[in-house]
Amino acid sequence: MFHWLEKNPFFFAVTVFVVIAFAGLVEILPNFAQASRPIVGAKPYSTLELTGRWVYIKNNCNGCHSQLIRPFKSETDRYGHYSTSGEYAYDRPFLWGSKRTGPDLMRVGNYRTTDWHETHMKDPAAVVPGSIMPAYTWLFKNTADIDTAYAEQLTIQKFFAVPYNKELPMADGSKVTVALADTLEGARASALEEAKVVAADMKDQAVKDAVAAGQVPEIVALIAYLNRLK
Amino acid sequence: MENRPLEYDYTVAKLFMYNAIFVGVAGMLAGVVLAWQMAFPQFNYILGVEFAEYTNFGRLRAIHTDSVIYGFVLSAVWSTWYYIGQRVLKVSMAESKFLMFVGKAHFWIYMAASIIIVIGLQLGITSSKEYSEFEWPIDLGIVVVWVLWGISIFGLIGIRREKSLYISIWYYIATFLAVAMLHIFNNAEIPTYLASGGIGNWYHSVSMYAGTNDALVQWWFGHNAVAFVLTTPIIAMSYYFLPKESGQAVYSYKLSLLAFWGLMFVYLWAGGHHLLFSTVPDWMQTMGSVFSVVLILPSWGSAVNMLLTMKGEWQQVAASPLIKFMVMASTFYMFSTLEGPIQAIKSVNALAHFTDWIVGHVHDGALGWVGFMVIAALFHMAPRMFKREIYSKSLMGMQFWIQTLGVILYFTSMWIAGITQGMMWRAHDEFGNLAYSFIDTVVVLHPYFIIRAVGGTLYLVGMVMFAYNMYKTMTSSRVVEEHELQNATPMGA
């Protein structure tokens, strides 16, 4: 059989493909629908949070920080409750990472504040002596891209029925609604409102002035995202 | 005309060879900068604080990985394809104007895409998925490049004179098919600009998969990108170049059959070992773990087949630095494909995952196996393409030992770093509290980061020596006659 295949490239290629594709069919497909169901308490990202999530990605934070707490005592002691699949239902892409040069950030919003992040991003070693993380000073100058995040929100609402503007059950029994504006102007305005809340806790005068003037620096969006990781 | 031997046309093979050498040096330079950044963070500001946005670890990391994998290795793979393909199929590229055009289009479109990728990554345009960071316009460009290569493969096969496909061709076909499948499924994404009616960046997209599913598809891709870019085409090279260079027949045809079909079937299952103890279903994790261990068999099948090809001819290893590269490559292949399965065992993975041990594993495979085999392949091809002997044998020998030392420093330091950090993360004191804060586990790695950076720098020095030796070989070393190019590559002092 093998000798015959080696003389018939078409059937050789087909056979190779079937043998290669087999594992993907068995491993990936069966669980697809089930694994993407949100857990109670999961909610989609607001416009500013999603903007911040892309600042996180743009700067490859996921290259050094994981967002996956494994079910070991040493990990739950350090980072909080282990991760569950339903918590990630609105994560496109997933940001588990593959390396912990720095600590896990899955629930960093539980134990770090806006103020801490601001100081830390300017000079990590000043907050954590011995840190090898570089300073991210440009985040204080660059303006965040709200529009693209809004475009993404519209896209995922349309294609994946992500529940914006709908009441969602929280773990404590309360209900939460994540608003999505009807227009781009509305989205910019609501992101700015969120940004003002974050900027109120910050010290950098240039950032405060920018937000007061209707601009959203990348650092504000990033902190909004980090604060929401819980 | 009828009785003249076939003249192979290496135009396209040469183009890819130039790029492989250039990107090899550039991509590893980026890697060395990253290594020094981890040892001394001030290297993040290597061009000044105002340019730190473009020179920091986060931005450079993807440029390093992508340029080495898709720039250096893939260019070398294609250079060998446009060399080996003609030879084992017994046809010349010059016989078909169409295939020659396809080959050149393949190279130039690939070059254009590469330049756009580097600029994009530098600006922070990324989808975040490791080794698949590109946004949708580039993903489409990659499809075009890949289809062109496919046309080249099957076009050349279509006009072949040798009816039976040599082992190397099996592996090129497998590479082509598997990467096509992986690329398309992992990059299923929706362009937000089009979907939202023209809002925001035109190149931005959002993944079709969410959370756990996204992770599953990504690591099914990520693991097998390693399999089908960094393993199968490299095996294709070793099956051609080692027998050619040594003048020995491949040790066992049956073993090559077992290794090939075994690898095809088993490799794809093992992706789950990147997701052990994650939120992926337990049975998939177990499958990933078990199949990773099974993977030792086909991997060692190829490696053993290579090493036994040298049976009775081991004096060649001492005599020829080129054979040294290939034998060392096969040895590192065995080593790396044993280490990988060990890391995929759940209890070991609990310790090793997220640490530098994984980085060490990647690099003993990439530098020791892939890098050495590629270097050997290019050294073997250059005299045959340019009709000149290798400029300097002693320079080649020196390069071999410097790079070998570099790899050893790299993986040993990363073993120690990884296991140290893994142990410290899980350590508890007598009251059940965590024994170390996270920063304790970073500071302790400092010496190992330095050793790794030195190892990487040595490897880079070897690459520069390689580039110089190749440059001189192409331009100014002694011209050789056809009869000198039978087996052992002619080398100057």
Image (cartoon, helix red, strand yellow):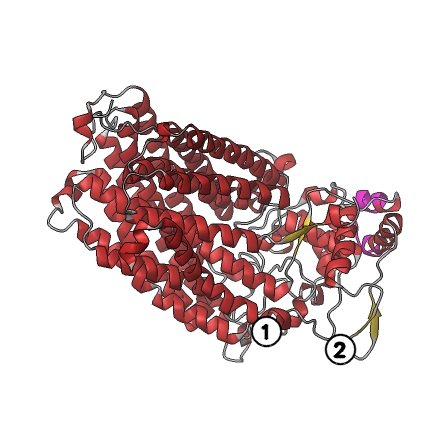
Q: Disc 1 marks which amino acid? A: Thr
- Quickly name the residue at label 1: A76
Q: Is residue A206 magenta?
A: yes
Q: Is residue A78 above or below residue B412?
A: below
The spot of residue A106 in percent (x, y) is 64, 65
Q: Which residues are magenta?
A: A197-210
Q: Disc 2 marks which amino acid? A: Ala
Which residue is pictured at 24% across the width and 59% down the height?
Answer: B255
Q: Is residue B300 above or below residue B48?
A: below
**Helix, strand or loop status at disc 1:** helix
- Quickly name the residue at label 2: A171
Q: Is residue A66 magenta?
A: no
Q: Quadrant of the C terminus of chain B?
A: top left
Front one among B330 and B220: B220
Task: Check if mark 1's residue and mark 2's residue have beta carbons within 8 Å.
Answer: no
Letter of the chain that mark 2 sits on in the rendering? A
Q: Is residue A226 above or below residue B391?
A: below
Q: Quarter-wise, where is residue A19 in the image?
A: bottom left
